[in-house]
Image (cartoon, helix red, strand yellow):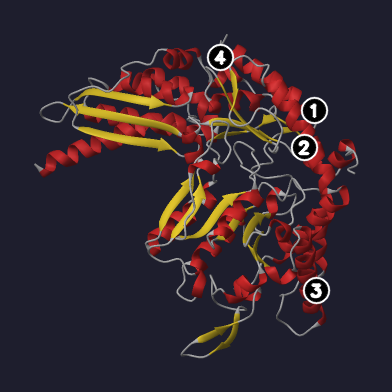
Amino acid sequence: MNLESMYQEVILDHYKNPQHAGLRDPFEAEVHHVNPSCGDELTLRVQLSADGSVVEDVSYAAQGCSISQASTSVMAEEIIGQDVDTAMAKLAEFEQMITSRGTREGDDEIIGDGIAFAGVSKYPARVKCALLGWKAFQAATADALTEREKK
Amino acid sequence: MSRTLNVEEIREQFPILSRTVRDGRPLVYLDSGATSQRPLPVWRAEEQFVLHTFAPVHRGAYQLAEEATDAYEDAREKIAAFVGAQGHEIAFVKNATEGLNLIAYTLGDDRAGAYQVTEGDTVVITELEHHANLVPWQELCRRTGATLKWYKVTEDGRIDLDSLELDETVKVVAFTHQSNVTGVVADVPEMVRRAKEVGALTVLDACQSVPHMPVDFHELDVDFAAFSGHKMCGPTGVGVVYGKAPLLDELPPFLTGGSMIEVVTMEGTTFAAAPQRFEAGTQMTSQVVGLGAAVDFLTEIGMDTIHAHEQDLTAYALERLQTVPGLRIVGPTTAEMRGAAVAFDVEGIHPHDLGQVLDSQGVCIRVGHHCAWPAHRALSAQSTARASFYLYNTREEIDALVDAILNARDFFGVS
């Protein structure tokens, strides 16, 4: 087994220097996700633009393994400042790659550094780690949009 | 007097131990606390039963059914004797989790008589419990309005008997014989003494003790106990629930249906005597026979011998692991009153990443919170890595573990 194929430099860099980390105000939705198989925990906040079309901020506090930490960092870097639609397309591309058991490389034009996680997809036990932050973003954004509809 | 265990001879009985993983690495299996490997004689017993003696048990009036029933009931007697019980004091369940649920449900049943847990009663557990001996008691309290209390853990991961005083409201004290995280062995006689003083029943989670040391439920004087077959060289899908004869005889059923009845009318049902009352529907027959063979296998080697071997491995592992910079043992750092599960963390490496690097070198350990989240919280560990040893493990495998951890430190640039 080639450990380097999983632990790409990009991943280790994000793990050591997570981007956009920390919980920030303002935020309109906050979720807490856990990975019960390994105990990783993540609190994530989302702030959308006034018209709800742009992801203005994603902030987070996470405890967990290198894969979940780095993946959350890459997610924040890729998604902050993007249209919600673009962000969701990135999420879809990342999810397809990461659940492909190593059969999809991922499109770097869509998910940028996210393609560094292609090697992780060969290890089913780590897929949940890699998806933790992305799924939390999806849930928080859904919460934010649902709240807006109520108003 | 315990003999020395011939590990090489034992390993030959486990074909899986000679296979390789991850590009030709020899398998170093250090996860027997989760599930143990199965030796050939156990597999052969299952095969023999399935291919040559298979028929419904306790039904059918023909020779084959008689033979199958005999195989099943002979296994019951053997397994009961292995833990110092009588055959009619144990019932087969799918695993210890089901066994503990069986106890928690029947004690909450309105037909449990004097044993019934109701509002105003207290159920006591410990912070050290596996979720299997924790969640069913939370649920019992939720259903009945009883209060859940617990003994806390000490800094080195033992049950702190000074942290809780039992009173007359305590109906049940449920605790683990040997922790699946810190490896500590509970002071069962003292905990039973305290429970008896207030008239409480005791429930022992014996999952991590029965496979690893001689255990005698009568001598320990616990009221109930449960353990799983797959942690003691037996098959998955079979576990045992033990109850002292007068208790099992009096308690109502858990699962109901075929085979567990006495008389059924459209208006109501009376139930068979224990243990059949607790064995509803067609049972896991070949697994029971396999567990009987596992008991034979372990008995032949000798539980004292197995325990001595594991004590040696544990002491060696604790000593070697503590030479690794930044490694913290979560639990006692010596082998006294502790078994062969060793949880630890390594500064600067998340357990999941550590497990990945170890896997790349063929070393199988458990990472996470090992179904004991509150225990981790109490010991200030977000998650841990755990190596657990059994009769087939060797000192060389512990050396491989330590080398792999050192490699992980290099890989992640921890210094």
Residue drawn where x is 71% and y is 66% of the image = B285
Q: Chain of mark 4?
A: B
Disc on the earlier residue, 4 or 1: 1
Q: Is residue B27 left or right of residue B353?
A: right
- The residues tagged by marks 1 and 2 sit, at their Cα atoms, a distance apart of 10 Å
**Residue A128 horizontal/vertical position (percent):** 46, 35
Callout 3 touching callout 1 (CB < 8 Å): no
Disc number for residue B395: 1
- The residues tagged by marks 3 and 4 sit, at their Cα atoms, a distance apart of 57 Å
Disc number for residue B70: 3
- In the figure, B379 relative to B294: above or below? above
Residue drawn where x is 51% and y is 38% of the image = B375
Q: Mark 3, residues whose alpha carbon is within 10 Å: few (<14), some, or many (≥20)?
A: some
The answer to which image quadrant residue B393 occupies is top right
Disc on the earlier residue, 3 or 2: 3
Q: Secondary structure at mark 3?
A: helix
Q: Which residue is mark 2?
A: B310
Q: Secondary structure at mark 2?
A: helix
